[in-house]
Amino acid sequence: MNQLKQKFSLIIPFALSLMVGLAVLAFTPIATAQTPASAELPAVEWLKFQVPTAQQPDFIAQDAAIWTPVLSSYPGFQTKEIWTNPDRPDELVIVIHWDSFADWQAIPKNVLDRTTEKFYAAMNAEYTPEATGFRLAWRSDSE
């Protein structure tokens, strides 16, 4: 009987500790990949251009002088970046961040057409991008 009491005296604290530990784990928030709760998720416009390396400085300067002021004048514009590809020196990628897909798509077509023609005239060449748009699916600071 004494041995039985000793075994129970060891098992009971262990069982209680285990139950408390499981309860703590059950109620501790766990980070999960979730889509942000916002109705209007951010969007990214991604444009890839083939531009000979000798023309890239002028391309970047004209883009900054012509396109950036137009885009930044519209609601929802956040930032714009131009990236180079070290594996393909003749490739430039423009990344434009928007508050929402709707903001990005709200720019009138005639404004886009007029700005495109102005850019082509300044460059004395036409550059057709490979274009893709992305909507935010998840980000680390989403709750």
Image (cartoon, grey):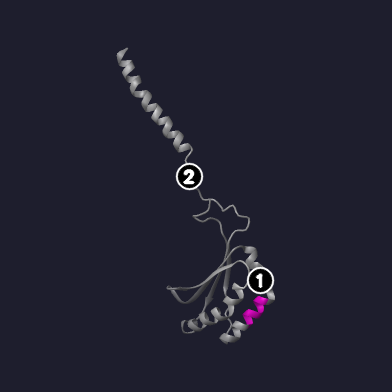
Residue at point 44% right, 34% down?
Answer: 22
Going from N to C along the chain, the mark reached first, 1 or 2, is: 2
Q: Distance between the residues labelled 1 and 2?
A: 40 Å
Mark number displayed over residue 30: 2
Task: State the image quarter where residue 111 is shown.
Answer: bottom right
Provide the residue span drawn in magenta: 111-117
Can see residue 138? yes
Q: Residues within 10 Å of mark 1 (few under 14, many from 20)?
A: some
Mark number displayed over residue 107: 1
Task: State the image quarter where residue 65 is shown.
Answer: bottom right
Q: Is residue 9 magenta?
A: no
Residue 27: image location, x then y, percent: 48, 38
Residue 127: image location, x then y, percent: 57, 80
Residue at point 30% right, 14% down?
Answer: 2
Q: Is residue 30 above or below residue 130?
A: above
Q: In which quarter of the image is the N terminus?
A: top left
Element class at badge 2: loop
- As drawn, the residue found furthest toward the top would be 1
Q: In this view, does 138 lie above or below 101?
A: above
Q: Is the magenta stretch mostly helix, strand or loop?
A: helix
Q: How crowded is mark 2: few (under 14 residues within 10 Å), some or many (20 or more)?
A: few
Q: Which amino acid does label 2 sit on?
A: Ile
Q: Do the residues labelled 1 and 2 touch (CB within 8 Å)?
A: no
Q: Which amino acid does label 1 sit on?
A: Ile
Q: Is residue 115 magenta?
A: yes
Can see residue 128? no
Residue 39: image location, x then y, percent: 63, 55
Residue 124: image location, x then y, percent: 57, 87
Element class at badge 1: loop
Residue at point 58% right, 70% down?
Answer: 131
Mark number displayed over residue 10: none
